[in-house]
């Protein structure tokens, strides 16, 4: 297992932590966790505040292809693919690469990028409907923290099963109590989160041998 920042070239989004904290209610959290229209394309209170393709994942796709030495004909899976932006961009930067996605949101899949149509599966990260060792790399970016701890372990184990030693997981975390406070004000959907040491324990319980990095709000 090793830490590697594959999202270094992703522009940092604007966040108003105070506005989110003031607006947040149990009802809003429950609606966000449905991953429907309000979460992706409703007001910022419910989630993204508009999840639209703008090409920002292209540099990240380039870095992923380089890092995993992906070649035309290889298969890569994006768990928590949402509308398939990364799936589209992986195929754009590496022509002939077979990219696929899986997400729990029917809304996201029904509003996916045209290039991703037929490549996105509806399902949950803790039960990936693919054979052992069937992918050259499996990614899960800002997704695994949306599962309860026991389900997150199952999800990580599933990634390891599909691509042993060839996973990349990015999850919500914090390195200091101050960062944890900011995170708690901001968070809507995450059901499990921890300091890096807590995540490393979870990865190890899942038998994970791939790579990982943290989303930290500062
Ligand atoms: C913060 S978004 C990240 C989307 C994309 N990976 C990105 O980084 O832009 C979290 C995604 O996880 C999906 N998700 C939540 N729970 C899931 C589960 N149990 N299995 C698969 N996907 C899930 C949501 O529908 C949503 O698309």
Image: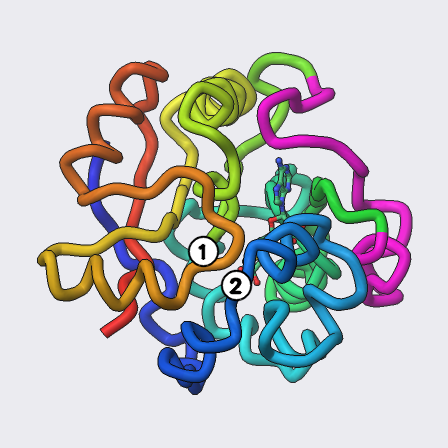
Asked if the stretch drawn in magenta spans residue 129, the answer is yes
Give percent across and percent down for residue 137: 51, 37
Residue placed at 51% from the left, 67% from the top?
24
**Is 31 in front, or is 132?**
31
Left or right: 193 in relation to 70: left
Residue 164, x across and y down, in percent? 43, 21
Q: Which residue is mark 2?
A: 61
Magenta part of the protein: which range?
107-130
Q: Which residue is mark 1?
A: 64
Q: Secondary structure at mark 1?
A: helix
Mark 2 Cα shell of 10 Å, populated few (<14), some (14-19), many (≥20): many
Instruction: Please identify the quarter of the rendering in which residue 130 is found.
Output: top right
Q: Could you give the CA–CA distance between mark 2 and mark 1, rounded to whole angstroms?
A: 5 Å
Residue 47: % across, % down? 60, 68
Measured as percent of width and height from the top left, residue 217 is found at 29, 69
- Identify the residue at image location x=83%, y=53%: 109
Count of marks placed on residues: 2
Callouts 2 and 1 close, C-beta under 8 Å? yes
The residue sitting at the left extreme is: 176
């Amino acid at each position: 297992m090793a830490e590697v920042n594959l999202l270094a070239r992703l522009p940092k989004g604007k966040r108003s932590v105070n506005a989110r904290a003031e607006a947040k209610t149990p009802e809003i959290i429950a609606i966000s966790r449905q991953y429907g229209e309000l979460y992706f394309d409703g007001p910022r209170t419910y989630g993204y505040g508009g999840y639209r393709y703008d090409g920002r994942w292209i540099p990240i796709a380039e870095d992923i292809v380089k890092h995993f030495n992906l070649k035309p004909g290889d298969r890569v899976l994006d768990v928590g693919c949402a509308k398939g932006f990364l799936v589209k961009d992986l195929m754009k930067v590496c022509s002939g690469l077979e990219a696929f996605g899986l997400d729990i949101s029917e809304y996201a899949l029904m509003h996916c990028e045209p290039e991703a149509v037929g490549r996105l599966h509806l399902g949950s990260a803790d039960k990936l409907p693919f054979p052992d060792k069937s992918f050259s790399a499996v990614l899960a970016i800002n997704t695994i923290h949306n599962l309860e701890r026991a389900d997150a372990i199952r999800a990580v184990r599933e990634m390891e099963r599909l691509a042993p030693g060839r996973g990349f997981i990015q999850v919500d975390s914090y390195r200091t109590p101050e960062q944890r406070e900011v995170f708690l004000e901001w968070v809507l959907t995450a059901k499990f989160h921890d300091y890096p040491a807590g995540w490393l324990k979870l990865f190890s319980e899942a038998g994970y041998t791939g790579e990982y990095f943290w989303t930290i709000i500062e």
